[in-house]
Structures are given as structure tokens and as C-alpha cells.
Amino acid sequence: MCIAEQVIAPLHLQRIYDPSVFANANPSAKDTNRGEIQIMLRNRLITGPLLSLALIALLYADEQLGSVVCGCCTPLQPGLLIAALAMAIVPLVAIELGSIANGIGLRCSIPLMVISMWGWIGAIFLIPNTMETSTTIALICTLFIASIAISVIALSKNRDLKGVLAGTTFTVATSAYIAFGIGMFLLLRRDHSAWWIFGVVAVIKMCDTGAFFIGCNFGKHKLIPWISPGKTWEGLLGGLATAALTAVGLAAANNHWLQSEPEIPLLTAGAVGLLFGFLGQAGDLVMSVFKRDSGIKDTSSVLPGLGGVLDVLDSLLLVGPVAYWLLPSG
């Protein structure tokens, strides 16, 4: 096991959103679970704000870079720092996907997943707006087919063909899911201020936060226990309400301070917040299916209190495409 895999080895501490978990537990078990929850909450309250501040700083810098013209009189591509961040986290994402594959008993190629995600994210960022649609589609298709071919070759080494089909499917499909989900935010950045990226992420993560705290304190009715045993209907409704209120507040700020961006009616913002919150929770459940099939709770422990990088990204992946098509362009 390499050093990176040791650092982000899966942490099998259960997150508990439903207080009814304690109902039939003995006193010592209750104390142990409460202690674990308190540690998790403490870590989350440290890691979450630090990540938020780092994201705000990066988006501020990206917004400034968007107006810089290089020596050849060409404006820098909007989203340069967002793309750089995506490239930086790709190796961690690939290792976490490898952990999921190992739990299922699938063979996969972590280096190929890294290369594939780098290729797709890089292509989405670098493809100019002036490129013909047919050429763009041809480029993406070429990268996709090349990923399949290289994966088959990589997994067929030593003349061992067992599991090549399943491993290739997992390697290519999961890499595309992550890269295209991130890529949609890069496309959104082309049309909007970096602060709109912050707004979309904030709505989704506030939904996560609202769902966690409402579910932890008031959750009684389980949502989909065979996928995510801790999620409750009360938590979902609390999260959606938090997302809607966050969207309304951010729309008001957009209408007041971002004069170059389209104005968003507050009622529309509330509805969009509900939709983004719902899709964010759906994205979280998709990843929960993968993890439950693999027998792990968190993809890693690289982010104390939050789990792995995929545990943070999962709720963004389904929202990106909808945000791109739904939000008005400037």
C-alpha cells in the first residue's frame, strides 16, 4: 500500500443522523456513540469552515484572473484556478475510487483513472467557445474510446483477463462521472462570475448542513434505510428549507452587488434552491449506493469530520449539469 493510500485509508466510524439509533442501545454503547458523534461534529466544525475559506479565497483569485490579459493580448480562460484545483484533487479521488473497487472485488487502474480525469477536465477547460460542435463531440468521443482501449490493455497485463470487462467499465464510467460533473462547473464559469460557482456550492452544502443538524435533532422517520440508514425525512425537509433560504439570500446579494450578472427573482431563487438541494441529496445517495455495495462508510478519512474527497464532491455532481442548463446566461 502506497503512502497516499495509507493516509486516506477508509475510516469505518458510522455517521449517525437519527437519534432513534440510541433507542435500544445499552448505556455504555450510547455513551460511545455520543462520544463518536461529538468528535465528528468537532472535526466537521473545524474542517468545514477551513474548506469554505479556502474556496472563497480561490474563487476571489479566479475572479481577478478572469480580467487579466497576458502578453499576447489574450484574456485568461475563466476558471483557471478552479480547473487547477480539480486537477490537484484528482489523484485523491482516484485512490478513493480504487478503495471502492477493492471492496467490491473489482480490478481497476488508478493511474489510468487519474489520466482519464485529467484528460477530460483539461479538454473541457481548454476547448474554446469558437470550436465547432461536431469537433468538440469528436474530441470527447476520442478521449472516451481511448480510455476504454488503454484500460483494457492495462488490465490485461500478465495475460490475466479475469475481470477485465468489469474493471474497464468501472475505471472509465466512474472517471467520466467525476470529471464531467466537475467539468459542468467549468462550463458554468465561462458564462458567469466565479461567485456564481460559490453560490451553487453554498446552496448544496447548506442543504447538507441543514439536513445533518435537523435530522440529528428531530429525525424519526428513515428516508431510504437500505441505502443510507442514517438519513431521515425530517433531515431532508430541513435541508431543503435551508437550501431555499440560502438561495434567496444569495440571489438578493447577486441582484445588489453583481450588476453584470442576470437578476434572479427571489421566488425563482427559492425554487432553484429546492431543486439544487434535492439533486445534491440525490447525488449523495448515488455515492452511498457505491459505498454500501463496497462495504465502506466513508471513501477515506482525509478530511476529518467529512470523510473523503468524494464524500464532499458527491452532492455536487448531479447539480452541475442542471445548473448549467437552468441558470440564465449573462
Image: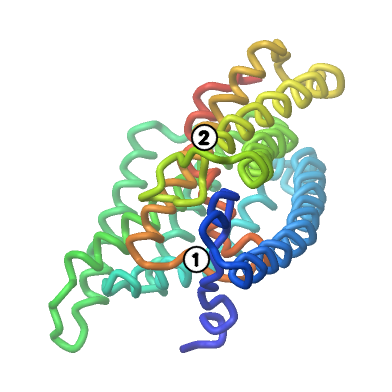
- Picture residue at 21% right of the left edge, 70% below the top: 152
- Picture residue at 79% right of the left edge, 47% below the top: 56
127 over 323 or under it: above or below: below
Circle 2 residue = 233
**Sequence-earlier tag: 2 or 1:** 2
Measured as percent of width and height from the top left, residue 164 is found at 18, 71
- Tell whether 177 sits left or right of 54: left
62 over 265 or under it: above or below: below
Measured as percent of width and height from the top left, residue 315 is found at 53, 45
Tell which of 107 and 302 is nearer to you: 302
Quadrant in the rendering for residue 39: bottom right
**Does residue 78 appear in the picture of this structure?**
no
302 over 182 or under it: above or below: below
**Does residue 235 appear in the picture of this structure?**
yes
Q: Is the residue under label 1 in contact with that under label 2 (CB below 8 Å)?
A: no
Quadrant in the rendering for residue 84: bottom right
Which labelled disc corresponds to residue 38? none
- Picture residue at 82% right of the left edge, 18% below the top: 259
Measured as percent of width and height from the top left, residue 105 is found at 27, 74
Circle 1: is it few (<14), some (14-19), or many (20+) Cα within 10 Å? many
